Each structure stands twice: as structure tokens, then as C-alpha cells.
Amino acid sequence: MAGSATPRAETVMPPPAGATWTSSDHMLEMMRVVLTAREAPVGQTPKDAVWRKNKSRLYRYQRTTPATRRTPVFLCMPLINRAFVLDLRPGASFVEFLLSEGFDVFLYDWGTWGPEDRNVDVTELVTRYMPRAVRQARHVAGHDLTLLGYCIGGSLSACFAALYPEAPVKNLVLFTAPIDFAQAGDFGIWTAKGAFPIDRIRDVLPTVPGEFIDIGNRMLNPLSTTIGTYIRLWDKIGDPSFDLKGWQAMYRWVNEGTPFPAAAYHQWITEFYQENKLVKGTLQMDGRRVRLSDIRWPLLNVAATADSIAPRPTTAAIVNHVSSADKEELLLEGGHVGVVVGRGARHNLWPRVGEWLARHD
Amino acid sequence: MTERREAPESAHPDPFEAWRQFYEASEQAWTKAMKDLYEANEQTWTKAIKDVTTANWYAEAQGKMLETFLAFQKAMRDGMSTQLSMLNVPTRDDVARLGELIVGLEEKVDQLDERVAGLEEDLARKVDERLASLEKRLARQLDERLGRLEESLTRQAQGAVQRVLGGTLPLGTPAKPKRAPAATTPEMDRQAPAEPAE
């Protein structure tokens, strides 16, 4: 009808502070936040690559002042995620915290595996990659190290500690590292012998895609990790106190999984999950038995009460199997990622780890 | 919030006008209702889903689905590989094989590097040990020779002194140089005590 044209809305994004957001505003802003998350700045603490092997890189973080602690920290990262999780952003970086406490910090990033790495297995990672990386870090730092492993990196670190007690390492710290897979939770059910076609996976796929692993992780909490993520974002959009950059950095990390070499995945599922060889003492690497009782370095084991990726029974076993005279466990409320890099970690886990490292310097 | 500006006037009615007015009036309420519905039921729905996904039959069914997918994936890959081979185009596996050779080469270099480092350490340790042993031996031999030299010189010195003095001194007696008589006056001679007999 003539003369009845309704004024069209011209959208201004984001709405000014104090303004009421419409659903369209929320939707548009959410799309912008999610789509730009893949470029979120992460891992910004300056570092130098001091050694490399294949796709892996050993980094040494730059210090602006000389280290005041003698024992450098060697961070062994998980295989299936990007390594920047411990250096997410300024102010939310465990690496930054360690540097501020006076430690020299090394990070071993496994890199992104390709089809040519299909035959790289866990044995090769523990017996060929880790010893050389540790030796190189020792050579560069000039002092024995503290080996700190996170998640699968922790499991590999435990195997390394058992096989190489003579390595230039004086302390072992594990963050939510699964060791005993007898009660491995949902992952144990899904990868059970007879149900999970692990041999077929190894034969067909040169690397297990990051997306495949990611689906498994999301199935642990199907609604919260899918729809719930966006519903919570919907609520927070427009709130001036919402740490948008922090959300984007974590979102980027969660969605950037790295591929798992087929042989390593096969060994991880069969020998660790299905046959639980590590804790039974029957795991062999390079013709040598991996015995957790051969670990004598001082040990700090950090575990989470609500960890669905490495459930409590998987992380509790290590302290009962090592021969270390000096061993301690920190059991914290929270999930697999939250206790290590969540908002509360900088007030809870990090100072306690810093204090333990200082005592064992 | 949105800023509004006047749209140009149109002769035709907007067919979506009614819907748009209804939407703008109720969308906030609808959004809130759906969100509240989700939040109220998230735990229940999650539990229901997990009751299914953690059952053994589900794991087996999932495994079978995965096998089917892998069989399809393999068939696709093999078919593609055959087509590409016929066109003389390298496949991903061909490139991966090259990559594997390079990685293997890097491993051999690493092993050589380790052996060289080990040899260097062994050599350095053996050189240190050898040097320490040589030092000890040299020091001992030097001591012995210096001792003998000293002895020989002493004997020669004594022999020379003996010859000078006409053989009056027994061997081994350290030769005492004879004091030259001091220049004295007769008065001093009368006052000075007699020199002790040798």
C-alpha cells in the first residue's frame, strides 16, 4: 500500500554499549566471532627453534632476563592437539608463568604428521625422537631438565622415564596423563577389542584425521561440546566482561586437532587401551621392557576429578608403580583441559607446580 | 541496538510486512524460550544420549559403520589411484613414499650424528685420561732426573773443591770457604781472640 513503507533497519555491529541486542545482532556477532576464531592470535611468547626432527620442533622460549632457576623445564606436548595450548595468550599462558618464575623453558612440538609418517609408531617417538630432543635441550641449557608431559605427552614421558633412567632429567611432572587403561571410561568402551576396527584403520588411513579424534572427544559430552558451545556464546555476546579473545583462542585450539600417524594410533589403541601393557609391565619398546618401577626421578602427578578424556582411574595408577622416593599427587577439581589451562589454573595449578619445581630445582 | 533510517517509499505493499512485525515483536521471547528449554534439559538429553553411546551394542554398531566407511574409502582411493596411474599422474601415496625416504634419510643422519657425538666424547675422555697419565709420568721422571742431576752436581762440586784444597777435606764435607785474613793493626792482633782450630 502506498505510504505504508516501514523503515528498514540498518544494522550497526556491534551494538553500542548498554544497547539491547536483538537475536539478529546475536546471530551476526556470533558468526563473526566463530568465523574469525581460526585467525585468533595464539602461542605469542617469542621462541627459537633449537632442533628439529621430521615434523617435530624443539623450541626454547626467549627470556628477557637471565634465568634465576637452575633446572629448565621441558614440556612434552600431546600428539593430537596443537602445542600452543600451554601458551594460549598473554596473561593465559603457562609458559609465560614459568618464564616469570625464572625458569628456562623448552617446548617439544610434535608438529603435524603427514601420509609419509604412517609407519611412525609410539615406540619410535619414545626411543628415537624424545631421547634426542631431551639431549639437545640439555646441551643447549647446560643443566639437567624437568620433564613435564601433558596428556598423551605425559604417557610418553612416563615410558621415556622408565626406559632411560640415565637421561639428563632430574624431575618428572605429569599433567592428566593416562597410565592405567583398565577403566578408561567411554574411550575404553568405544575402542574395545572386537568392536573397534583398529587394524582396518591402520591399513586404510595413513594418518587418523584430527576430525576423527575430535568426534570422539565431543561424544564424551555430546550436547555441551556442540550446541552448548554456541548457546553459551549467545549468552555472553554483548557482555563487556566477556573475554572474547580468550574464547576465540580456546575455540581455535579445540577445533585444530592434528592427525595421528596410523602406526602410532594402532599401537596406542591396542597396546595401551586394549591390552593395558604399560601398567602390566609387558610393554616392549625397542626390545626392552618398559617398567614403571624403573622410574626413580622425583614425581609430581597432576590429575583432574572430572576428567572424561583421562578418567581418574587412568591417572591415579602412576604413583603406585614408580620407585621414586619423592612423589606427590595434586588432585584438582575440574576437567582435562580446565585444570591445566582454564581460568582457575593460573591461581590454582600453576603456583603449586611453580612451588614444587622451585623446591626441586 | 539497530539504527533505523527511512526507506524509500514504494508503490507496492511489502508482502512480508506482517511476518516481520510479528517476528520483531516476538523473536526475543522465542529465543529465550528455546534457550531456556535447552538449558533445562541439557543434562537429561545428554544422559539419554550417553546411555545409548556407552552401550556395548552401540560400540559394535559404530565399529561396523566405521568398517563400512573404511571399505568405501579404500575403494575410492584405489580407484582414484588407478585412474591417476593411467594418466601418468603421481598419487598422494607416491609423494608420501618419497617423503618416507627423506624421513628415513634424516633418521640415518641423526644416527650418524649420535655416533660422531659418542666418538667425540670417547675421544675427549681418552685424551683427558692419557694427558693426565702423561703428566703424572713426566712429573715423576722429571723429579727423578732433577734429583740425580742435583746429586751429580753436588758430587762434582765437592770433587772440585777437594782438588782445589789439595785433598785435605774428606768427601762429603761441605767445603767451607777460607776467610781471607782481615787487614788488622798490631794492636788489633794483640786484642783479637785466637781463631779456633779447624
Image (cartoon, helix red, strand yellow):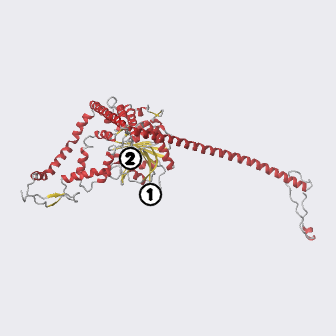
Residue at left 51%, top 48%? A139
**What amino acid is at disc 2?**
Ala
Callout 2 secondary element: helix
Q: Position of residue B137 (x, y in %)?
A: 70, 45
| Same chain check for tags 1 and 2 | yes
Left or right: residue A307 compared with residue B190: left
User: Vertical placement of A204 versus A70: above or below?
Assistant: above
**Residue A249 visible somewhere in the drawing:** yes
- Tell me the chain of label 1: A
**What amino acid is at disc 1?**
Thr
Q: Which residue is mark 1?
A: A64
The foreground one among A33 and B175 is: A33
Callouts 1 and 2 close, C-beta under 8 Å? no
* Quadrant, the N terminus of chain A: bottom left
Of label 1 and label 2, which has the lower sequence position? Answer: 1
**Residue A325 visible somewhere in the drawing:** no
The foreground one among B109 and B93 is: B93
Residue at left 86%, top 57%? B176
Decide: few, some or many residues near mark 1? Use Cα within 10 Å; few <14, some 14-19, many ≥20: few
Callout 1 secondary element: loop
Q: Position of residue A142 (x, y in %)?
A: 51, 49
Q: Position of residue A222 (x, y in %)?
A: 26, 40
Left or right: residue A18 compared with residue A99: left
Q: Which residue is mark 2?
A: A83
Q: Position of residue A264 (x, y in %)?
A: 40, 37
Residue at left 68%, top 47%? B135
